Image: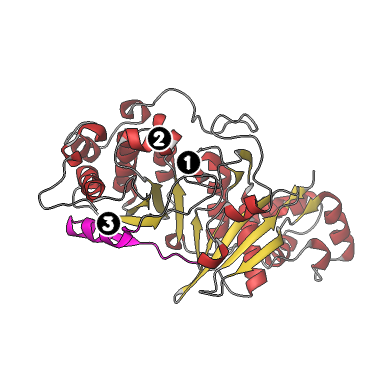
Amino acid sequence: MKTALLDFSLDELKEYIKELGEPAYRAGQIMSWMLRGVELDDMTNLPAALRARLSESAEVGVPTVARRLVSSIDGTVKYLFRLSDGQCVESVVMKYEHGNTICVSTQVGCRMGCRFCASTIGGLVRHLRPGEILGQVIAAQRDTGERIDGIVLMGIGEPLDNYNNVIKFLRLVGSPDGLNIGYRHISLSTCGLADRIPRLAEEHLPITLSISLHAVSDNERSEIMPINRRFNIDTLLCACRDYFDKTGRRISFEFTLIAGKNDDSVHAARLASLLHRYFGSEPCHVNLIPVNEVKEREFRRSPRSRQFCEELCRLGVNATVRRHLGADINASCGQLRRAEGLGDTTGGIASDAVTDEADISGAAVHTSALYPRSSKSKKKAAAGASPDRTEAEKTPDGAEED
């Protein structure tokens, strides 16, 4: 197996080059080429002998474009990238007035088992290396000829299930020696590996943490997100509150609206009550997402996105409805890979296809066993019992169900 040079920081690349008996400055030349997606044979300012020697034992490893779809509506570009071992992942480039944002994948497949998600249907094949995540950004910049200004780790895979590789990717992509994308323009989305959130706070990376919440009670969340049986809502939100206390970074909560499941006024009131209980007047944000309809799933898109958003805002919760970009190309991750017949592997939440990096299948973890709560977290959590047994379940005066 060849050494993947994109996995290296500049300092690591210098050490690698020096071990080959070459001057350290060659590493800077190689890094400059790699960040433009250039393979070793085409690095013209390197001696031919060095290029040949490197090619024998190393590779850059930028993924190739297996398929490319462009939205005629808004210019969104969806990629199916082929990795060096033949596996495929998806990325989506979204164009905004302020710049371009890419949604990247962090795993080939996913073992979290979320019932509304296409990415998890085939289970987990393997984790992506740091350079394979970085390579998606580089390949997209090379293909579009435009700079990527922001990154969301919301593609195929659970980022915190591939923790070490994702953290190294973040350091590589944000480094002045790398693509130098500002951390405040990077969002990481997790389905709720609560034991990794305190660790993430200690990394001192000022990224935005997004939580895939999608339900307001443990019973409802466990039904659609098996990870909740391991880390329930109280454990997750206490970890989120501690993350906010340690980093000062506003947390975003993703809430997929499913018709007839979680889109009525009662759920809006319960969601507002839940966030007020753990965060009080501290800033947080709810990103409402109309569910992506997948033929293998029974969930249907809610017609109440706007009403639900207005109800949250009236209850003092900052909320927006996510723009549905690339609607004509099925831009949500996981769907193109499955359409190509690449998501039909055996896996899922109990998969043993890879070595477990995060324990997601054991007994439920109580909050007190996870980490010492901050005083603020204790105060917020003490305001009520489990989310399944709270006043938030009651319909507020004047609220009506559609």
Q: Nearer the viewer, residue 30 or 60?
A: 60
Q: Is residue 362 left or right of residue 255?
A: right
On the image, numbered disc 2 is attached to which residue?
223
The correct choice, above or below, for 127 with respect to 78 in the image is: above
Q: Is residue 18 left or right of residue 387?
A: right
Residue type at mark 1 is: Arg
Q: Is residue 317 left or right of residue 227?
A: left
Relative image position of residue 8 (x, y in whole percent):
66, 52
Q: Which mark is residue 308?
A: 3
Q: Which residues are magenta?
A: 303-326
Neighbours of disc 3 within 10 Å: few (<14), some (14-19), many (20+): many
Using the numbered discs, state the Cα–Cα distance from disc 2 to disc 3 in whole angstroms: 22 Å
Q: Was residue 214 drawn as part of the magenta stretch in this picture?
A: no
| Residue 388 visible, this orientation | yes
| Residue 131 visible, this orientation | no
Q: Nearer the viewer, residue 375 or 19?
A: 375
The correct choice, above or below, for 242 with respect to 283 in the image is: above
Label 2 close to label 3 by CB (< 8 Å): no
**Upstream in the sequence, badge 1 or badge 2?**
1
Residue type at mark 3 is: Phe
Q: Residue furthest left?
A: 397
Q: Which mark is residue 115?
A: 1
Neighbours of disc 1 within 10 Å: few (<14), some (14-19), many (20+): some
Relative image position of residue 162 (x, y in whole percent):
56, 41
**Upstream in the sequence, badge 2 or badge 3?**
2
Q: Quadrant of residue 60?
A: bottom right
Residue type at mark 2 is: Glu
Using the numbered discs, state the Cα–Cα distance from disc 1 to disc 3 in whole angstroms: 22 Å
* Residue at (41, 54) in percent of width and height: 301
Using the numbered discs, state the Cα–Cα distance from disc 1 to disc 2 in whole angstroms: 8 Å
